[in-house]
Amino acid sequence: MLWQVRDGIGQLTFNRPEHANALGLCSRADMEEAFAAMAAAEVSVVLLSAHGKFFCADGDIGDFIANIANPVSLVDELIDYLSRLLRQLASLPVPVISVINGPVSGAGIGFALCADFVLASDAAKLRGGYCALGLTPDLGSSYFLTRRVGAARAKEIFMLNRALSAQACLDLGIVDHVYPAAQLNEAAITLARELANGPTAAYARVKALCNQAASHDLYTHLDAEHVLMLQSARSADFQEGLAAFAGQRAPHFAGR
């Protein structure tokens, strides 16, 4: 996996195109290094993308074949390190955009859908993947997919293991937008720049509120909104927003 920063925008890129960007033990060092660099960087937005024709084709089947006598310890080790990375990505206080350029399945679903914005190429496809090997979902794939499509539809996707086209994913709400393949990266960068120029501290509070909403009752959530609104009202970005509105000009937010 690669990490780079340009103009305040960080980009994580799956970089095993010859293996369909499958997640395995041989990519562990590269992934942990990239995520450590991400944690140390000060960025306003993070893009998650992939090199090659696939976004992420689940776990590396080569690892399973090599450990066919004791697959349980392999599964445990893979989930342990990949879950730590997924938690890190999902808990970022800045907007995360996943850029699904091609097929995604299994554990790749968790990484793709943990993002705040999910953009896809018209060449993208989604397949549950797990049940084809007698396995069950991991790395948040069932969590994030269920949040987007509901439990009944998520069970169908995982159990029947049928490939969904990009348009089907859009119709179901699995992805937010679909673009022609040649336009996907440009659309992702345009969105990233728009977000990077916005009130990124307010975005962090929006993420926190929306992520907590399902586990809060109304009164708890009203209190949480109250606390974060007061934090926002004390910010320089709010003062700039008011001044821009009064002066009939575009705001210039300082962000985080």
Image (cartoon, grey):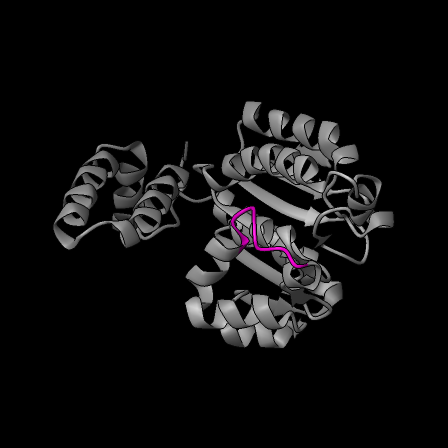
Is residue 45 inside the magenta stretch? no
Residue 8 seen in the figure: no
Name the side, left or right, on which 226 lies relative to 56.
Answer: left
Residue 217, x across and y down, in percent: 18, 52
Please name whichever residue, 205 or 8, is drawn nearer the observer in this view of the structure: 205
Give the residue displayed 61% in from the left and 45% down from the top.
Answer: 47
Residue 50, x across and y down, in percent: 73, 49
Q: Which residues are magenta?
A: 134-141
Residue 91, above or below 125: above
Is residue 137 inside the magenta stretch? yes
User: Which of the 4 quarters of the picture holds residue 226?
Assistant: top left
Please name whichever residue, 52 or 152, is drawn nearer the observer in this view of the structure: 152
Name the side, left or right, on which 116 lies relative to 69.
Answer: left
Give the residue displayed 79% in from the left and 43% down from the top.
Answer: 68
User: Which of the 4 quarters of the picture holds residue 41?
Assistant: top right
Give the residue displayed 16% in from the left and 46% down from the top.
Answer: 220
Please name whichever residue, 197 or 13, is drawn nearer the observer in this view of the structure: 13
Residue 168, x across and y down, in percent: 59, 76
Residue 91, above or below 186: above
Give the residue displayed 30% in from the left and 44% down from the top.
Answer: 241
Residue 124, x across and y down, in percent: 70, 66
Residue 35, above or below 179: above
Give the total of numbered labels.
0
Residue 134, above or below 85: below
- Which secondary structure class fits the magenta region best? loop
Please name whichever residue, 116 or 107, is drawn nearer the observer in this view of the structure: 107
Rendered-image quadrant of the C terminus? top left
Farthest right residue? 18
User: Which of the 4 quarters of the picture holds residue 33?
Assistant: top right
